[in-house]
Amino acid sequence: MSMEAPAALYVKIHAAMSSCDIIRGMSASRSAHSSQAHAFQTDDPRLSPIHAKVMAGERLTADDALALYRTGDILAVGWMANFVRERMHGDKTYFNVNRHINPTNVCVAACRLCAFGRKKDTPGAYTMALEEAFETAASGYTEAVTEFHIVGGLHPDLPFQYFLDLCSGLKQRFPQVHLKAFTMVEVAYLSKRAKLSIRETLVQLKASGVDSLPGGGAEIFADRVRHIICDHKIDGGEWLETAKMAHQIGLKSNATMLYGHVENDEDRVDHLLKLRALQDETGGFQTFIPLAFHPENTALQHLPKTTGMLDMKQIAISRLVLDNFPHIKSYWQMVTAKMAQISLRFGADDMDGTVIEEKIYHDAGATTPQGMRREELERLIRAAGREPIERDTLYRPVTRTETSVTVAV
Ligand code: SF4
C-alpha cells in the first residue's frame, strides 16, 4: 500500500474520478443545473463559510460537519447537498434489480441493535441447506435480477466450505448475476472459523464467486457506542482494516452507518471522517448508505425511531462530508419510499433496488413493503424530477429490451 500523504491521494482520486463515466457527466450537468438553482439562503451564520467551501469544491472539516448536524436550517443543508449531488450526477438517479438472500439468522453475537439474529435451536432460528439457498435464489428469479445481496448471522457450526459452496453454486446456476456477499463482520468471523488470515479468507471468497462486498456491520465506529449496541462484533478498526484488505485484492465494497440510537453528533462525524480517510487511501468504496435505526424487537426498543429531519439531514451531511464517495444511497426500505424520494433533492443519487424479500429490517419492525416493482420505483424517481437509471452493482447502466439485458462496460 502506498504511503503517500492523504492530501496527495485525495487529489489523485479526484483526478481518477474525473475520468470515469459517472463523473464525466458532472460538468455538463453542473451548467444545466446552476442556472436553475435558486439562491442559497440561511439565517445561520455558521453555514455561510461552509457554503463558500462547498461552492469552491473544498473539503469540509470535522467542525464543519458538526455545525451541519447542529443547525436547524435543514433547507440550507439540503441546498448544499443537492448542489453537490447535481454537480456529480445531474438528475441521474440509480437503482438496481436485486434479490436478498439471508442464508441463516443463527448468530453467536447478541447485538442489542439486532432483531434478526437468533441463538441456535431457539424459536425462529433457521439455516438454509445449500439446495434451499439455491431454490430461494431461483424462486421468483427473472432475467431482470442483476445482483444477489447475501448477508446473514455468524453461525457457530457452519464450515467456511459452506459459504464457498454457496457462492460457487450460485455462480454456476446464475453466472450473469453479481454476488455482493458478506459484510466485513462476517468475513472476519469466517476467517476465525477457517483459521485463515483475513486476506486469505477474502481471496478464497473471491475465487468462489464473490464479486463485491456490502457495507453492513459498520454501525458506528466509536468504541463507546459499539460497547452498547454491538459488543461482540469486531471493533471499528477491524471493520476498516477488513474493508481495506478487500479493496487491496480488487473487491469493491459499500459502507454504512447505523444512526439514530445512542450515538451523538461527534460519533457520527468521527465515523464519516474515518470512512473518508480510508477512501482516500484505497478508492474502493462505491456507495455510502446511512441506515436509520429501527428499534422494534431489539434490546433497544425503548428508543424512539429516527425523525424525518434526522433522516434528511443524515443523507445531506453524508453527501457533503464524503466528497470522495461516488454515490450516496437512500435505502427506501428503511426510511420509507416517500422519504427516499424526497432525499433525491437532499444529496442522494441512488434509491437501492427492487429488493425481493428483505428480512433484516422487517424483523426490526420496518413497515415498508418487502419489495417494490420497477415501474413504481421509476415513477417515484421521475416524480422527484430525476432521471431513473437502472444500474448493475458496479454502476454500469443496464439496458433492457423485451428479450435481452445488456450491461454497458
Ligand atoms: S447484527 Fe449481525 S452480528 Fe449482530 S446479532 Fe445481528 S446478525 Fe448477529
Image (cartoon, grey):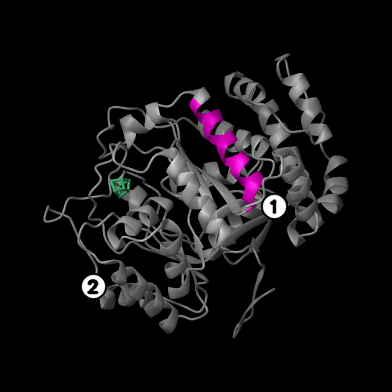
Please give left or right for residue 129 compared with residue 369 in the image. left
Please give left or right for residue 143 compared with residue 403 in the image. left
- Camera-near label (1 vs 2) is 2
Q: In this view, does 122 lie above or below 143?
A: above
Query: Does the residue at mark 1 contact the one at mark 2 (Cβ under 8 Å)?
Result: no
- Secondary structure type for disc 1: loop
Please give left or right for residue 144 compared with residue 47 in the image. left
Q: Mark 2, residues whose alpha carbon is within 10 Å: few (<14), some, or many (≥20)?
A: few
Which stretch did the figure color magenta? 267-283
Q: Quadrant of residue 79?
A: top right
| Distance (Cα) linking label 1 and label 2 | 42 Å
Determine whether the beta carbon of the residue marked 2 sits less than 8 angstroms from the nearest atom of ligand 1: no
Report x, y in % for residue 139: 35, 75
Front in this rendered view, residue 161 or 72: 161
- Which mark identifies residue 129? 2
Give the residue drawn at x 50%, y 79%. Answer: 143
Give the residue drawn at x 77%, y 20%. Answer: 48
Instruction: Tell which residue pokes out farthest to the bottom in this image.
Output: 403
